Image: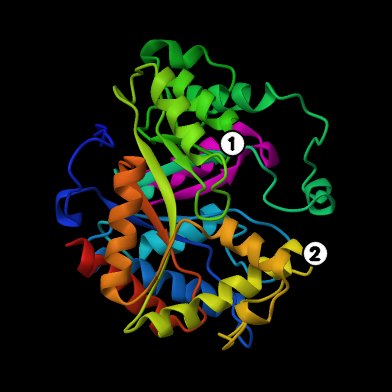
Amino acid sequence: MHARRLEGSRPRPHLCEMIPFSILDLAPIVEGGDAGAALRNALDLARHGERLGYRRFWMAEHHSMPGIASAATSVALAFVGAGTSTIRIGAGGVMLPNHAPLVIAEQFGTLESLFPGRVDLGLGRAPGTDQAAARALRRNLASDENQFPRDVVELMDYFKSGGQDDAGRKVRAVPGEGLMVPVWILGSSLFGAQLAAMLGLPYAFASHFAPAAMESAIGLYRANFQPSAQLDRPYVMLGFNAFAAGSDEEGRLLATSVQQAFVALRTGNPGKLKPPLPGYEESLPPQAKAMLDQALSCSAIGAPATVKAAIEDFVHRTGADELMITSQIYDHAARLRSYEIVAEVAG
């Protein structure tokens, strides 16, 4: 994997000259639906993305969330992997403090054994839930800040193959040992950027919902990157929301579902993904509008031309090496169409 740095002084490129696009899916459980339908829709979206030329299909670990079906991330990825053939599948991400590194090495070693050359492992240090659920996961809430880096290094070590020395290992990941599973560091702050740079790993920033530190984090990562066996140059993937439709008005209407979800989450009332609601944003108090403007600032909303311009501007401004597109859209057919429009304007 090789990074390409797009400096701000360069002429703005056309999308078709740019970068790969990938898909982040939370397997949204919509109002009136259930987890089974959400996971079947995830597979359908992955197949759609594969046909359209998206590079990766990632799913994220969240717990105790009524509107997200990807809690058992490796199990969900096995289902998606079995129903696709070429698109890379991966975690965006596994919240490593919730797990023993050995267990994750075994799970993703199993996926890589089943789908060789197609598996990515993105690692985050957040719990992916609230404190009550974190305690239910037996997560050590008092762990020091160095525990996550130690766990990442331990996990990566399980994938190594030492040849004759393997027989002397006291603990071995089988499946996992000797397999090439690319590890990514996920983050929304400077901590993950520093760790990814130090370990020479690709870095995925959660700009699709927490963009405040994006520019500082990717600048720090690029400036401090140390080449590794996995990666010789910095590689930045940025999360980006897309609500693409036939018109700007329709795109804005589709986006009201995720707006409702953000407001519900920030007020402590997470639920299933709601249908679009005309006039929703206009009905909100100023503080809620400001929160949405900040949280969803890395977004393309509207007709194809509007979406293309927004993506071009974002890539030109950030120099991203890859975009991870997420579209929390209530209607599955509209969600498929949104990804289709993004692929069209990118090609």
Q: Residue at point 36% right, 66% down? A: 46
Front in this rendered view, residue 267 or 141:
267
Name above or below for residue 156 compared with residue 86: above
> Where the C terminus falls, by quadrant?
bottom left
User: How far across and down, in percent of the image, does residue 156 sit?
Assistant: 49, 26
- On whether residue 92 falls in the magenta region, the answer is yes
Determine the main secondary structure of the stretch shown in magenta: helix
- On whether residue 111 falls in the magenta region, the answer is yes
Quarter-wise, where is residue 342 in the image?
Answer: bottom left
Could you tell whether 33 is left or right of 217 in the image?
A: right
> Where the N terminus falls, by quadrant?
top left
Q: Nearer the N terminus, badge 1 or badge 2? A: 1
Looking at the image, what colour scheme do you see? rainbow
Q: Residue at point 60% right, 32% down? A: 101
Q: Residues within 10 Å of mark 1 (few under 14, many from 20)?
A: some
Front in this rendered view, residue 129 or 194:
194
Per the model, the C-alpha gap separating discs 1 and 2 is 22 Å
- Labels 1 & 2 near each other (Cβ < 8 A): no
Q: Which residues are magenta?
A: 89-113
Q: Which residue is mark 1?
A: 189
Could you tell whether 340 is left or right of 11 in the image?
A: right
Front in this rendered view, residue 246 or 74:
246
Dot 2 falls on a residue whose secondary structure is loop
Q: Residue at point 63% right, 37% down? A: 125
Quarter-wise, where is residue 333 in the image?
Answer: bottom left
Disc 2 residue type (three-letter): Gly
User: How far across and down, in percent of the image, does residue 3 sit?
Assistant: 27, 32
Disc 1 residue type (three-letter): Ser
Q: Which residue is mark 2?
A: 268
